[in-house]
Amino acid sequence: MIQSSENPSSENPVPADMPVASSAPLKAPPAQGPRLSPAEVAAILAIIVIWGVNNAAAKVATEHLPPLLVGGLRFALATACLAPFIRPPFPDWRSLLIIVLVGGAVQYGLLYVAFWLANDISPVTVANQLWIPFTALFGFLILGERLKRGALVGMGVAFVGVGWMMLDAHALQDWRAITVGIAAGACWALATVVARRTTSIPPVKMQGLLAAGTLPILAFGSAVFEHGQVEAIRAAPPIVWLALLWAGVVSSVLATTLMFWLVQKREAGRVTPYLLATPVVSMAIGGLFMGDVLTPQILTGAAITIAGVAAVALAERGLRAGAAKA
């Protein structure tokens, strides 16, 4: 979903909700007009809402179904929608395997476990945004990319924000969920760094590969480590199936398509900062409708974290769009 690098491939379009390989052929950069068109603004708002709601949907689903089962059902829906785009060739299959395993099965498995463990969605959603600083850090450690001073400052601010948020007595109760959410973000960051070294793959095809590769692994994990799946499915209320439909189709397919359209028209760095509003949407839903406890300390920590993440995104102008993935 995001790549933070100084190399020329950062100009190429990438959809949200997935890591995408860098493009080999050079192409003209997207338009960089001073104002976004009404259609572009509408697309950005739609993505923010879709991803913000998707975090809440993940919590709703994992309250009724085991977390790995939720992930498997989500990607069963996504695979059904994206199957027509999954066809040869499959270049650089070793890198693709890492992307699918780490950025797909491991990352989403951890993320759904985090929502399953959490009492409130807000701290987990905010902490998961640390994947953006992790992307810049892994790019420096693995690929030797230059790490700008502003990005370093932003990293420090973001981690301080999460630490301050976790010192709140209520948020501290979710320390396991927050830790797992941070680990999920680190996995996604690693996948995006690996994606930078692969050859060009159409984004919808990559999303299809991610879904098709994640589905059997999460399904197997659910069969081995979880129990009571059949009973949980039978007892699940309609809102759970709406949540899964939202995740598998609206978030994984529709939001991805909108993002790809946006970054074809605009440089990714122009779009990314707006998407940092996604955790705000999730926190609003959590606070208003799901009983999240939002103390002044949690809100302050969240604000500090998002400010730090924004500083990284703005300093690393090569970051690809998708900062607030879901």
Image (cartoon, grey):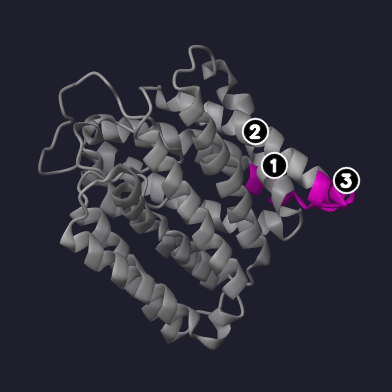
Quadrant placement of the N terminus: top left
Instruction: Mark 1 or mark 3: name the one nearer the start of the chain.
Output: 1
Total numbered badges shown on the rendered structure: 3
Place of residue 270 in the rendered image (x, y in percent of width and height, measured from the top left)? 21, 45
Residue 165 is left or right of residue 271, and the answer is right
According to the picture, the residue beneath numbered tag 2 turns out to be 77
Magenta stretch secondary structure, dominant:
helix
Q: Is residue 125 magenta?
A: no
Amino acid carrying label 3: it is: Val
CA separation in Å, label 1 and label 2: 13 Å
Which quadrant of the view contains residue 197?
top left
Place of residue 11 in the rendered image (x, y in percent of width and height, measured from the top left)? 21, 33
CA separation in Å, label 1 and label 3: 16 Å
Mark carried by residue 230: 3
Task: Report whether residue 78 is seen.
Answer: no
- Image point (23%, 68%), residue name: 153
According to the picture, the residue beneath numbered tag 1 turns out to be 218
For residue 296, above or below residue 158: below
- Image point (24%, 46%), residue name: 145
Amino acid carrying label 1: it is: Leu
For residue 317, above or below residue 220: below
Q: What crowding class fits label 1: few (fewer than 14 Cα within 10 Å), some (14-19), or many (20 or more)?
A: many
Which residues fall within the magenta stretch? 224-244
